[in-house]
Image (spheres, rainbow, N blue to C red):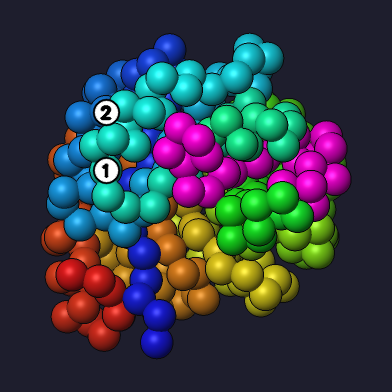
Amino acid sequence: MLTKRIIPCLDIKNGRTVKGVNFVNLQDAGDPVELAAFYSENGADELTFLDISATIENRSIFTELLKQISERISIPFTVGGGIRTVSDVARLLSCGADKISINSEAVKTPTLITAVAKEFGSQCVVCAIDSKDGKVFVSGGRVDTGIDVFSWAKRVVDLGAGEILLTGIASDGTKAGFDKDLTQKICESVSVPVIASGGAGTKEHFLDLFKNTWATGALAASVFHYKQLSISEIKNYLKENGIPVRL
């Protein structure tokens, strides 16, 4: 059985790690380079870096920051935010990213998923899907596209996405638990790994997710940034309860 992945997320704005609730009221959460190094050294299976204002500000990701992070970590590194072209992806991979995450631009230009998958392989393409009330939201959760989330999940896989990063906007930052119903329905509708995001607050939430859904990974931010939970604490708890993890 494949081990379940615990994935810290660095939401970046103006070069700093930030975290909010339901995608708003962002608070500073620390230096991204130091946080990345800490997570890499303390059991994270992967690291996700999302430049959350790049799309809104119509700019590219800060590549110098990516290089600094990639030099300090030894785990798979997914990067997203402001990706619009295949050349953008090539630039991020050259800065140390292993996978790229596309969200808003995937909705705007679905063919980008296919183009990136063709150039670099489906394993490189993570489609991030932010959902509320069964619909897909873009632009940092600000814009309701009206697209059905389940139809969209199936479509992005058909287009070439090798993984889905699913965030329940209503759960994000609440520490009330992952949206298990949404996660499992998405897992059942696609043939690729699904990472659940939004709502982690206790180690029991991670166990609940992995026991009751087919999610292959759990992404969290504030519980790690503010030292409310450690990755080793979560993994030991999961192992004690029969969930396969890498220690």
Task: Reply yes or no: does residue 111 show up in magenta.
Answer: yes
Name the side, left or right, on which 219 lies relative to 161: left
At 72% from the left edge and 73% from the top edge, which residue is drawn? 189
Is 205 above or below relative to 189?
above
At 15% from the left edge and 60% from the top edge, which residue is drawn? 232
Measuring from the top left, give residue 1's x and y in whole percent: 39, 87
Name the side, left or right, on which 124 lies relative to 233: right
Helix, strand, or loop for circle 1? loop
Q: Are marks 1 and 2 in contact (CB under 8 Å)?
A: no
Query: Badge 1, how many Cα within 10 Å: few under 14, some, many 20+?
Result: some
Badge number at residue 226: none
Is 190 above or below relative to 109?
below
Measuring from the top left, give residue 214's x and y in whole percent: 51, 76
Name the side, left or right, on which 96 lies relative to 53: left
Q: Amino acid at mark 1?
A: Ile
Q: Amino acid at mark 2?
A: Val
Indicate which disc, 1 or 2, sits on the residue closer to the N terminus: 2
Which residue was labeled with disc 2?
33
Looking at the rendering, the stretch of residues picked out in magenta corresponds to 93-116
Is residue 164 visible to the viewer in this orientation of the structure? Answer: no
Measuring from the top left, give residue 49's x and y in whole percent: 44, 36
Name the side, left or right, on which 53 lies relative to 148: left
Which residue was labeled with disc 1?
73
Is residue 127 visible to the viewer in this orientation of the structure? Answer: yes
Measuring from the top left, give residue 91's x and y in whole percent: 57, 30
Helix, strand, or loop for circle 2? helix
